Amino acid sequence: MVQAYILIQTEVGKASAVAGAISDIPGVIQAEDVTGPYDVIVRAQAETVDELGRLVVARIQQVEGITRTLTCPVVHL
């Protein structure tokens, strides 16, 4: 299982709607609105890195109101 944090920037005033829409996507563990340079932080999981990439590109980035994402895979050192 691969997990990642996805940091999301949204259009002004869209953070809550984006977090709500993303929280319904299978593979998303949690989606929270936050303050700072990013507007929403998501924790997601998938079976493989490729599936995680498809989740981000095909599902999450398609949510209306998102302007940029940054995916940070979790590593166990």
Image: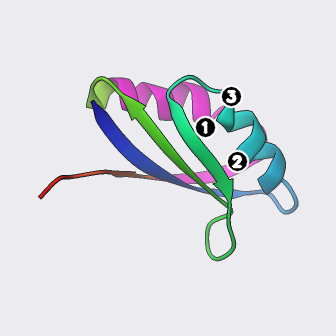
- State the CA–CA distance, disc 1 to disc 3: 14 Å
- State the CA–CA distance, disc 2 to disc 1: 7 Å
Residue sticking out furthest to the bottom:
36
Which residue type does callout 2 highlight? Ile
Question: To which residue does mark 1 refer?
Answer: 61
Mark with earlier residue (1, 3): 3
Tag in front: 2 or 3: 3
Q: Give the crowd class for mark 3: few <14, some 14-19, many >=20 residues within 10 Å.
A: few
- Image point 46% across, 38% down: which residue? 44
Residue sticking out furthest to the right:
13
Which residue type does callout 1 highlight? Gln
- Secondary structure, mark 2, is strand
Question: To which residue does mark 2 refer?
Answer: 66
- Image point 50% across, 35% down: which residue? 56
Residue 41 located within the stretch drawn in magenta? no
Q: Position of residue 14 (x, y in %)?
A: 83, 53
Res 16 label: none
Mark with earlier residue (2, 3): 3
Q: Which region shows up in magenta?
A: 51-70
Question: To which residue does mark 3 refer?
Answer: 24
Tag in front: 1 or 3: 3
28 vs 50, left or right, is: right
Q: Quadrant of residue 33?
A: bottom right
- Contact? badges 1 and 3 (CB < 8 Å): no
- Contact? badges 2 and 1 (CB < 8 Å): yes
Mark with earlier residue (2, 1): 1
